[in-house]
Image (cartoon, coloured by chain):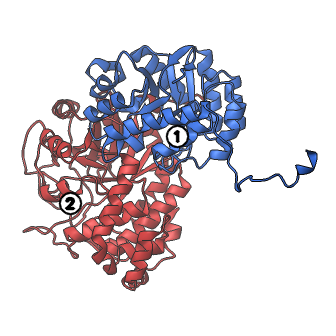
Chain colours: A blue, B red
Amino acid sequence: MDTLIIANKTFHSRLFLGTGKFSSNEIMQKAISASETEMVTAALKRVNADNSEEDDMLQHIFHENITFLPNTSGARDAEEAVFAAQIAQEALQTNWLKLEIHPDPRYLLPDPIQTLKATEKLVKMGFIVLPYIQADPVLCKLLEEVGAAAVMPLGSPIGTNKGLKTRDMIEIIVEQANVPVIVDAGIGAPSHAAEAMEMGVDACLINTAIAIAGNPIEMATAFKLAVQAGRMAYKARLAAMSDSAEASSPLTSFLQ
Amino acid sequence: MFSEIAEKYSWTQIESEINAKSKSDVEHALQVANLTIEDFKALVSPAAAEYLESMAQKSRIATQKRFGKTIQFYIPLYLSNKCINHCVYCGFNFNNKIERIVLSDEQILREVAVIKEMGYEHILLLTGESPKHAGVDYIEHAIKLVHPHFKQVTLEVQPMSMEDYQRLIAVGLHGVYVYQETYNKERYPTYHPAGIKSDYQWRLNTPDRLGKAEVHKIGLGALLGLENWRVEAVFMAMHLQYLEKKYWKTKYALAFPRIRPHAGEFMPNYIVSDKELAQMIWAFRIFDNDVEISLTTREDTEFRNHMIGLGVTAISAGSKTMPGGYAQDSEDLEQFAINDNRHPKEMLEVVKKAGYEVVWKDWDSYFEIEKEG
């Protein structure tokens, strides 16, 4: 598969994984391995960042092939997110960050205003910021302008497995973007991931759909294949859909 | 304030509405995506007793979707059993001739050392109500003392003013559990005949004050065994719905403390069976997919083992309900008898075997920074 570049770093896989909700760290590790992902995110609040050698979850994530992407889940505003990012940077020696600011603890929907504010500040501080956001094309352009390394619009509310409910907006985002577009949240089945990739999305981030599947490891493999198939289909240019067969040319036959 | 809403409803009318729910009402409630309070009434009605399996299935799926295959662990730390209240069902009742203790700094830190050894990162501090011995100054001091050792500090103490809550939030308080005991306004004084706690409305509006103080988490509950649990559940559901809409940045949690009959103590007026408690928990899970639900060591081993993942998202283990109980084991002073004495390590194995991962830590102090302006 063609490579993906984010902030000058090359990724051979277009599937990113989240780490919440797994029934054990061992299963999570096997799912990560089966998915062949090269980027894995975890919530800072779940791990002991200041003692990462002894943190069981982190030890099951860290691997030479994997870029670890700490996220700020739990932050309610820009100030908290920036503070969390600094902790992550210091403790984990990384300037990569998945920015999550959701003041609403029920649907965990991102706050666009605080996210834009925090992105601007964090980029100036030298972070590589991947913000989790609503599928809002204007917001994506604004984030791009302040230096976001990629944008991560949601397909549907996090954990819902409902698929690409925001499809029309994501199409516009893909069309307009100068940075990679990663669909994050809501993808519930490999077919959803393939659909997103066929639309030209650069990568998908999956968590719940793998973590709570009957067999998370096989599901991770299924997502790997779906993302590859979707990407390949996009590159091969899909044939246009049509409602009727085009047997004759009744309106243009006079031109011959 | 929620009291203005609660006033509009009559206990007996809600009770008869619940009893009037039919099987088809239950089936409807099990089908719709967004449940109304009427649907919730059907789920806690006698008619729903035949649908427990479907309710359990739905709860399991909803819980997994939102919380994954994980269970949070937390532990209570009793700081004081001094109490000016006369709650007829409670071991800390003012009239009970028991030794009264308020833990000193040294004693608190000794408890902390034992608890840390067990692996805990989330701690729940509890006291009896004693403004003189365990008032807001004492609690503020205790939070400051334990906060460096834990990632999440919550409270279950007397209701306070919004200003006092703000004070405690500033030193690291994450959340507060305040149980109404009973939502039945007429019967409330029977159980709380004297002391500050006899003020029904002050207690009822406590979550509003917490919401205004912008605490991260608010826990609600009713003490099961006092009044008809089905009606308690409906008031609780209305309370939860009201709070979620009004204080939308706050996370909510529910607990289902159940009084069980045992000799020489307060006998529950309504005995809530395991089946009924499960029905109540599942009704809430189906009604609200996002609310946290905890189950304490009041419940026995068998029930707790089976409820993991069926709506429940947090459990305690190895709990002692007497002040000083971790460093020095004694059953004399406990608030209530523990039904599940398993050590957290043993409980961890049970959770693992059930196919769940224990979450010891789901918060960090960097979300508790003081804001500029």
Q: From the viewer's side, name the closer residue of B315 and A217.
A: A217
Q: Are marks 2 and 1 in contact (CB under 8 Å)?
A: no
Return the residue at label 1: A194
Badge 1 amino acid: Ala
| x and y percentages locating residue B175 in the rendered image | 39, 44
Marks 2 and 1 share the same chain: no
Residue placed at 63% from the left, 39% from the top?
A238
| x and y percentages locating residue B90 in the rendered image | 20, 61
Image-based side of A83 in relation to A25, left or right: right
Residue A6 higher or lower than A205, as above or below: above
Return the residue at label 2: B93
Q: Secondary structure at mark 1?
A: helix
Label 2 crowd (10 A; few <14 / some 14-19 / many >=20)? many
| x and y percentages locating residue A208 in the rendered image | 41, 43
Name the quadrant of the C terminus of chain A.
top right
Q: Secondary structure at mark 2?
A: loop
| Residue closest to the far right | A254
Badge 2 amino acid: Asn
Disc 1: host chain: A
